[in-house]
Image (spheres, rainbow, N blue to C red):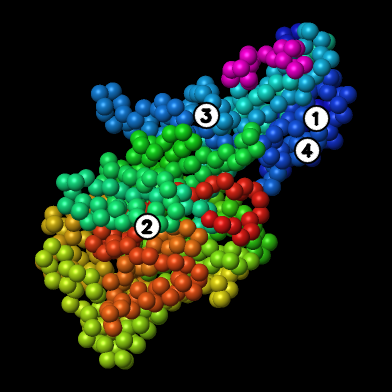
Amino acid sequence: MRSRRRIRTNPAGPVVVALAAVGTALAAPLSPASAAESAARADLRADVNRDGQVDLTGSTDTTGEDTWSSGRGAVYLPNIDDDTKRCPVTGPGGRPLSDAKLAACNDASDTKVNGTADAADLARIRSVPMRGLPSGAKGSVKVTTGAKQTRVYLKRAGNWVMITPQTSLSAAELRSGVEFGVEATDIIRDTRKWDGRTVIRLTVTAGGQSTSDSVTLRVAPLLTHHHLQKTQQMMVTKLNRDADWSGLQGKFVTDLKKEAEKAGITRPLVTFDKYQDPWAQDFVEPAYVSMTGTNGRRHAMRVMLRSAQPDREAGRELFEKVRGRDIGVVQAFDASAPADWSLNSMGNLETIPPYAHNGRAFAAGRIIMGWRKDSGERPSATMRTMLKSQGFQDPLLLDTSWLEVGHVDEFVQFLPADTPRGWRIGVADPEAGLQLLRDAKRAGHGSTKMFSVPGLGGSPPLPDTIDQALASRHLVSDNIMAAQRIAANLEILKRETGVTDDEIVRVPALYTRGSMARTEGGEDVRVPRLTRMGGNTPLPDEVKEHGQQRWLSRGGNESTAAARATVATSAYVPGAVNGILLSRDRYLAPRQWGPVIGGKDIFTQAVTAAYVKAGMKVSYIDDWYTYHLGMGEVHCGTNTLRDASAAWWQPAGPTTP
């Protein structure tokens, strides 16, 4: 905000002009000064139009320099990566650091610029050269809004020096024009405490008179990825060889690598191995922040968003192994443990691709999360506040009361499409699943086994038949209920996004209420109700030691069970929508292992047909014993790192992921 009036200094030195705190509504900027005025008036400029350059001679970066909107205004990054890997991951003697200490270290936690990679994380602001300044002139810089969350560095003699109250700019520097670098020390956590804005003021004093100018910046929003962004790399847990599940999981990892390569993903798998939590989707949500770099290209920083589950140790490996150059980690925990731990797994966070509808625009997509409508339980309040405070992806809650685990990835997904909208909704269809069984029975195949999966470790194959499944006391009613709940959620999505029935891909599915099974360690856990669970093949202990099974074995939903209006279910046939979008037209689904009639799996045929109709090529990966029996699928056991080069501030049209 420019100050045109001259202000007399006091004998002690340059005057610091008082500036009112800037909120969401800022004063309109004054008209830009002419070139002739620059010698007599301070003129501080930022990259307001977000092209990566600070315009010192024209007016492209003057209009709106004191305001900020989603489409215009200077952006700076939360510098929370660790470009030189200087942050310790263990304490003295190799002892583990606390979660708080792990999170406390990053490039913004010191007062240095740690090399060229760290310098690239700084947003630039510049002063217009003041050619005619007398030799006794001095300048000072002050952060008047957002000072606690902002650091400003001065480029002096080729080095970056942090601005302090004692820093004085010389007349020679002001005549040449000064370059500054700005970083935030954190993301926006709660707009009630900080809305992400900083105001930086330059004051120049010469001949007993002062002139000032200010610019406004806002920290880049933390954004989650959507499926129109290209998959660049995959993440999965790799179990130790001595784990009883390692053989099965090792084959899964090998098969996943092959499928990724077929889809054109060339970067190697990121593998988690320290804490042995197989649910790689659930302890982390890959996100990003970005601005335009000085080279004019998007400068993005990945941010691994740890699940709001402080007792889930696997999240620590994000700091210990993944954090590094242009990769930061954020954790946000509630003060007390939530009643529904499972809702805080990141499989319960997905992102609708960009859209605009009914006067609301979500250029970077919109988050969806599941909540227990029947009991009122919601995901972490701290996490939801943080996500909403970014101002771009306001979380939309969908009802997952009817799901034992309660994650949105169990029934809904978003698929790229060559349509004006650019995407479709993929949704599980229990009615179609029931119809497949009824049609098979009607055709005389009722005695066909319901599942074609072979037994494990000498155990017999599953004995259920199609007739027995349809005669089940609960299976039909549970799936009718699931279909009703999915339909209600679809109405919410249609109302919020404008999606029509023609833009919905319905994928055959079946759900079942849970039953108890015994692990190798002799503990009872809740699993899908399958006849095999009463047999002699126990579940691997890894299934019950992590994620939803760990939570359920400790009592799980018992505190809210009385408030539930429905039973809770999980996938009966492996949930096809709980797969991975590998590329724009390649989809990896869990192998169905459904009834085989005429040499073909009828669920595989129907699932493939649904995706092919939507323009997708489908491949399958076996996750029956690795994830399905633990109430998850291939999506739950993996994660994706996606491209973040698109400008989140520009209205999005159809894109190629």
In the rendered structure, the answer to whether residue 70 lies left or right of residue 638 reads right
> Looking at the picture, does residue 508 appear above or below residue 153?
below
Q: Assess disc 1: are there few (<14), some (14-19) or many (≥20) residues with their C-alpha within 10 Å of its C-alpha.
A: few
Query: x, y percentage for residue 590?
Result: 34, 65
Q: Secondary structure at mark 4?
A: loop
**Residue drawn 61% across the image and 65% down it:** 421
Q: Is residue 463 left or right of residue 159?
A: left
Mark 3–mark 4 contact, CB under 8 Å?
no
Start-end of magenta stretch:
154-176
Q: CB atoms at circles 4 and 2 under 8 Å apart? A: no
Instruction: Label 3, secondary structure: give it.
Output: helix
The residue drawn where x is 46% and y is 49% is 232
Q: Is residue 444 left or right of residue 537?
A: right
Q: CA distance from mark 1 to mark 4?
A: 9 Å
Numbered tag placed on residue 259 in the rendering = 2
Closest to the observer: 98 or 293?
Answer: 293
Magenta span includes 133 = no
Q: In which quadrant will I find the N terminus? A: top right
Q: Quadrant of residue 574?
A: bottom left
- Rendered residue at 33%/79% (across/down): 602
For the residues labelled 2 and 1, the Cα–Cα distance comes to 52 Å
Residue 51 visible to the viewer:
yes
- The residue that label 3 is drawn on is 117
Residue 633, how many percent across, how many down?
A: 33, 61
Mark pair 4, 2: CA separation: 47 Å
Residue 642, given in percent of the width and then of the height, sits at 48, 50
* Residue 57 image label: 1
